[in-house]
Image: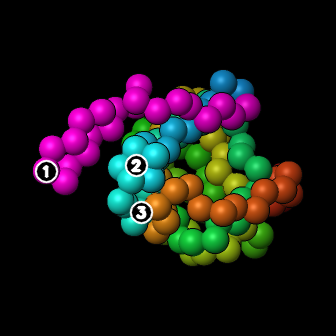
Amino acid sequence: MATVRGVTVVGLGDVDPVPLPLDSWSRVLISSATVGDNQSCLGYSVFTPGMATDDLSHEVEELAYVVSGSGELRLEDGVVAITEGSAAFIAAEVWHTVANTGDDDLIMVFAFTSSDYPPTDHKPSRLIDDNG
């Protein structure tokens, strides 16, 4: 990690991964722990094939960009496909599950309007999937 005149550069290896099921993981790269005077945070996730997160609802809006792979956002009333090169805006308090439905890792960059990963409600995924 390097800081020069108000610019901080954080590498993937500079922060510990948050382990997820099926050998998936996330890392919150930009946060109050790495920057200290930030007003937003940025992270990187790798979801292996077949991985689906819990049903999540964040206190603030989320922005996500799919670097590679494909999958879907499972919502209470529908499913939205996400593919390499697509970006998603998820409004605050919208319940969603990120699912890798492809054959390759789904790699995403995510950001929140919060200095750290925001308060988030979790529950086992119960949202719409391929079987309705």
Q: Position of residue 51 (x, y in %)?
A: 70, 36
| Mark earlier in primary sequence (1, 3) | 1
Q: Position of residue 61 (x, y in %)?
A: 53, 71
- 32 and 120: which is toward the camera: 32
Q: CA distance from mark 2 to mark 1?
A: 16 Å
Q: Residues within 10 Å of mark 3 (few under 14, many from 20)?
A: some
Name the amino acid, label 3. Ser
Would you identify the image quadrant in which residue 47 lies?
top right
Q: Position of residue 109 (x, y in %)?
A: 44, 48
Q: Residues within 10 Å of mark 1 (few under 14, many from 20)?
A: few
36 lies left or right of 101: left
Q: Residue at x 51, y 38 (%)?
A: 27
Q: CA distance from mark 2 to mark 3?
A: 8 Å
Give the residue number, with chain letter if any, for mark 1: 5
- 110 and 70: which is toward the camera: 110
Q: Is residue 31 above or below residue 17?
A: below
The answer to if 7 sits in the magenta stretch is yes
Give the residue number, with chain letter if any, for mark 2: 30
Q: Residue at x 20, y 49 (%)?
A: 7
Q: In the structure shown, which secondary structural element does the residue marked by tag 1 occupy?
A: loop
**Considering the image in quadrants, where does the C terminus appear?**
bottom right
Identify the magenta region.
Answer: 1-21
| Mark earlier in primary sequence (2, 3) | 2
The label shown at residue 40 is: 3
